[in-house]
């Protein structure tokens, strides 16, 4: 329309409405198409894959021989030292290029700008860039799509999408699940530090038994002993000052783990059978209830038929009211009992399904214990893999700060209740013998 002509401007509001509708309609169609591609797991971003992968002809991710090794190195070094800052420093010192450099070199992304940068900028790894790689589930072979979306067709600012689509075992993983879980366990629980991981193998695992706060690791110089290492509670609101020397907790944990290894591995069959008999909280359950449920369900259906026939006979006057009331009361009481038994058996059946998962956990834990020996029992990988938490309570003996009693509670990362119940069960049996 011509803004200089008065008659032409009369149609301006209508044209604006149509244009607005057209833009909204196109946006809706594009969103629908992209969402369908995401649901089906079809690649949406084909500019360049995540660091460590390349594309084949169908834009499926395949490990990149150059960058996959860097990703694996980052995970390995992080599990060793537990510090993203130290990993970033290691990468810089070894002049390993950042993802930005490889995206420019291999896929031409900002090529002219990136390849003209100084070497210092090309190897400018930061703790946050290391953490970003550690957190990514894609390195387990996952394909995660539609992780963000725009707010609407006018506002293109993107926000995180909680309903993204996740496809497991889609691509060849670069990192095994165990390493990924250990690395992320360390990442979520603790901040980076300068203390080597080999000195602080219990990083993120030590907790105060009184306030449930994370115990702080301390390394301080001593004129006679060189260095003194300990874990201690720093919470001001805590009523106790729980602390424990590192060598003491090492001795306790080593003893407990080796005792557990000997117990479980020497009685593998008993441990697996025991796992089938208890629920998630270590309570004994009865196996095989499906037959009883089917029998009671059949009886419940029969009672429904009897009650219906009784109503029909009463309505047609075949039986007197007194007989109807007596029989109805009898059937209703039996029906209540049957339905209650069905509910109870259904609960028990759900516990039996839990027993199946317990058996899987028991087998998994046995395989973990097989990797433990006297030489590696206090290694970072073993401790972080097997133990979930360690609670510490310390009390002075006769008011002495040097002499203390320690109460240690170890929570295992896998089937903790089952392990403790089995130990109690075995101790009870050995006492009876």
Image (cartoon, rainbow, N blue to C red):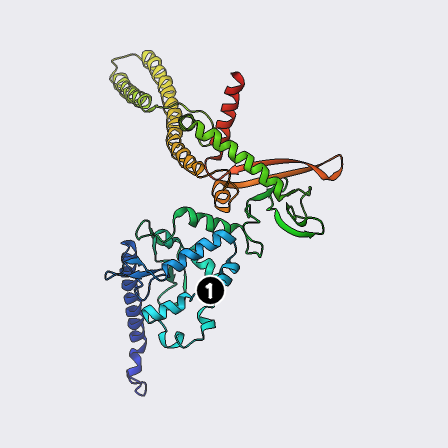
Q: Where is residue 357 in the image (x, y as percent from the top left)?
A: 38, 34
Please say if 173 is above or below 3.
above
**Crowding near pointer 1: few (<14 within 10 Å), some, many (20+)?**
few
Residue 389 occupies quadrant: top right
The residue lying furthest to the right in this view is 399
* Residue drawn at 32 percent across, 68 percent down: 106
Q: Quadrant of the N terminus?
A: bottom left
| Foreground of the two, 173 or 346 | 173
Along the line of sight, the residue nearer the viewer: 345 or 136:
136
Q: Is residue 418 something one can see in this rendering? A: yes
Q: Residue at x 64, y 50 (%)?
A: 218
Q: Quadrant of residue 13?
A: bottom left
Q: Where is residue 259 in the image (x, y as percent from the top left)?
A: 52, 31
Above/below status of 431 relative to 365 = above
Mark yes or no: residue 209 visible.
no
User: Which residue in the protein does label 1 denote?
Assistant: 94
Towards the viewer: 122 or 199 = 199
* Residue 21 at x, y percent in the picture: 30, 68
**Residue sitting at the far bottom:** 4
The residue positioned 33% from the left and 62% from the top of the image is 49
Name the residue nearer the viewer: 228 or 134.
Answer: 228
Which secondary structure lies at badge 1? loop
Number of numbered labels in the structure image = 1
Residue 401 place in picture, x, y as percent = 73, 41
40 shown above or below 359: below
């Amino acid at each position: 329309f011509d803004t200089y002509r008065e008659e032409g401007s009369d149609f301006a509001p209508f044209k604006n409405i149509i244009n607005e509708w057209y833009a909204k309609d196109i946006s809706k169609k594009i969103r629908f198409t992209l969402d369908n591609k995401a649901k089906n797991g079809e690649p949406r971003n084909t500019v360049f894959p995540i660091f460590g992968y390349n594309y084949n002809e169908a834009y499926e991710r395949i490990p990149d021989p150059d960058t996959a090794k860097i990703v694996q190195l980052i995970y390995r070094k992080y599990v060793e030292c537990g510090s993203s800052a130290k990993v970033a420093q290691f990468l810089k010192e070894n002049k390993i290029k950042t993802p930005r450099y490889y995206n420019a070199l291999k896929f031409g992304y900002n090529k002219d700008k990136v390849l003209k940068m100084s070497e210092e900028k090309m190897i400018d790894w930061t703790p946050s860039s290391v953490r970003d790689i550690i957190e990514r589930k894609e390195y387990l072979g996952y394909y995660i799509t539609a992780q963000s979306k725009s707010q609407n067709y006018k506002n293109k600012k993107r926000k995180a999408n909680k309903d993204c689509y996740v496809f497991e075992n889609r691509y060849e993983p670069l990192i095994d699940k165990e390493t990924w879980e250990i690395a992320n366990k360390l990442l979520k629980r603790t901040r980076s530090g300068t203390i080597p991981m080999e000195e602080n193998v219990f990083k993120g695992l030590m907790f105060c038994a009184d306030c449930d706060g994370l115990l702080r690791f301390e390394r301080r110089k001593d004129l006679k002993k060189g260095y003194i290492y300990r874990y201690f509670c720093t919470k001001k609101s805590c009523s106790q000052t729980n602390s424990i020397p590192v060598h003491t907790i090492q001795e306790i944990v080593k003893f407990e783990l080796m005792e557990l290894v000997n117990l479980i591995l020497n009685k593998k069959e008993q441990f697996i059978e025991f796992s089938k008999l208890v629920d998630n909280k270590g309570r004994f359950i009865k196996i095989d209830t499906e037959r009883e449920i089917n029998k009671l369900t059949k009886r419940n259906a029969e009672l429904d038929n009897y009650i219906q026939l009784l109503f029909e006979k009463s309505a047609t006057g075949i039986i007197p009211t007194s007989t109807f009331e007596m029989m109805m009361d009898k059937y209703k009481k039996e029906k209540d009992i049957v339905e209650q038994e069905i509910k109870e058996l259904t609960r028990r059946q759900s516990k039996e399904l839990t027993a199946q998962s317990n058996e899987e956990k028991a087998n998994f834990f046995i395989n973990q214990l097989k990797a433990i020996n006297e030489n590696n029992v206090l290694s970072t990988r073993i401790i972080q893999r097997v133990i979930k938490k360690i609670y510490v309570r310390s009390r002075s003996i006769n008011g002495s700060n040097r002499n203390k009693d320690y109460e240690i509670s170890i929570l295992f990362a896998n089937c903790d209740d089952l392990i403790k119940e089995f130990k109690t069960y075995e101790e009870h049996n050995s006492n009876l013998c």
